[in-house]
Amino acid sequence: MRKIKVLVVDDSILFQRMLKDGLNKDPMIDVIAVASNPYEARDLIIQEKPDVMTLDLEMPKMGGLEFLRKLMPQMPIPTVVLTTLSDKVFDAINAGAVDFVAKPNGKTRDQVENFIRNELATKVKIASTVKVDKLKKVKPEYHRTSNPISSNRQKVIAIGASTGGTEAIFDVISKFDTDIPGVVVVQHMPPGFTEMYANRLNNQCKVVVKEAKDGDKVVPGQVLIAPGDKQMRLKKIAGSYQVECKFGEKVSGHCPSVDVLFQSVAETAGKEAIGVILTGMGRDGAAGMLQMKQTGALTVGQNQESCVVYGMPKEAYNCGAVLYQEHLDDIADRIYKLLEELE
């Protein structure tokens, strides 16, 4: 099988070498070139035609974000961004990056090798499967066609996503009005970044968006994003929904896990819930969504055409967990129509 050809772009010669050596230990990856700045990278992309680029956001001469914005319209290439804790990473994804990894806090060889093996190599392999034309497109203007939600019955909407999910989640919740029932979300993302992501969405959406804290109530007009290092579950206490956010082991390979959230929603809310599974690699969420459907919840999966990675929605669809399969542009409208069914 042909190896994935990778271009490493980083201004640190030492880190370049460590990334190259570490990635080349994976039998599926071949680092064909390294670049110290975007100008070198641009020439190497033309000459070497890599399958994937890893890109440091913080570089002299031209930052990684500016480079992405100039590169993607002309020479789109699946890109994994390396970053410190900065909300610039969401601008990079908006500019066309597939995904990101947080640089390790420690810089010892063992720490970097562990980071490359367990995080970066995995993201590179996922990026190699992505069709970059799906990463950025003009969205049609959204006009809600459903009626206002008037019922006092408690309802909850649970959403799960991974690769490509930061933009997909925004696409859905940016269309929500303040009458939307409480929303709980798991997006695979490292700790620290989930709070920045929630704050960013909060500034862009009509609903309130915040990183969930243990004990937060699930209320209409609010979206709770699972913290990046905790498992989030739905609970019902004294007749009201709230979330439990606690440290725990990875489930389905992730913490937070979509399966953990969906299974708790199935057990707690049953037929009062709507489950939505969006773009992402793997099968996290499939079993939980099936359990939701079996307890009477209504379920929606993103279709292949609109997914950056048709992995999680495909697994959910194939196991019979998805009642409605929709293009990303139509998911918010489908949610509102299903809420009318729950009236």
Image (cartoon, grey):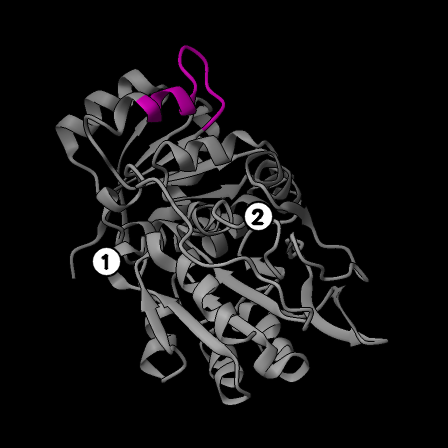
Q: Residue 328 is drawn in which quadrant?
A: bottom left
In the rendered image, residue 190, in percent from the top left (x then y), is placed at: 59, 49
Q: Residue at x 41, y 61 (%)?
A: 278
Question: Distance of mark 2 from mark 1, alpha carbons?
Answer: 40 Å
Mark 1 residue crowding within 10 angstroms, few (<14) / some (14–19) / many (20+): few
Q: Nearer the viewer, residue 219 or 145?
A: 145
Q: Which residue is mark 1?
A: 305
Q: Are discs 2 and 1 less than 8 Å apart at CB?
A: no
Mark in the foreground, 2 or 1: 1
**On the rendered image, what quadrant is the N terminus found in?**
bottom left
Q: Is residue 277 left or right of residue 310?
A: right
Residue found at the very far left of the displayed protein: 47
Determine whether, in the image, residue 204 is placed left or right of residue 144: right
Residue 241 versus residue 329 in the image, above or below:
below
Instruction: Identify whether 14 is placed above or below 149.
Output: above
In terms of secondary structure, where does tag 1 sit?
helix
- Given the image, on which type of amino acid does mark 1 rest? Glu
Element type at mark 2: helix
Q: Amino acid at mark 2?
A: Asp
Seen at 64% across and 46% down, the residue is 209
Give the quarter of the figure containing the C terminus: bottom right
Residue 29 x %, y %? 29, 51
Seen at 47% across and 77% down, the residue is: 298
Q: Is residue 196 above or below residue 159?
A: above
**Of the pair 160 and 121, the residue shown nearer to us:** 160
The span picked out in magenta is 57-69
Q: Earlier in the sequence, mark 2 or mark 1?
A: 2
- Residue 110's tag is 2
Residue 7 spot, x, y in % from top left = 29, 35
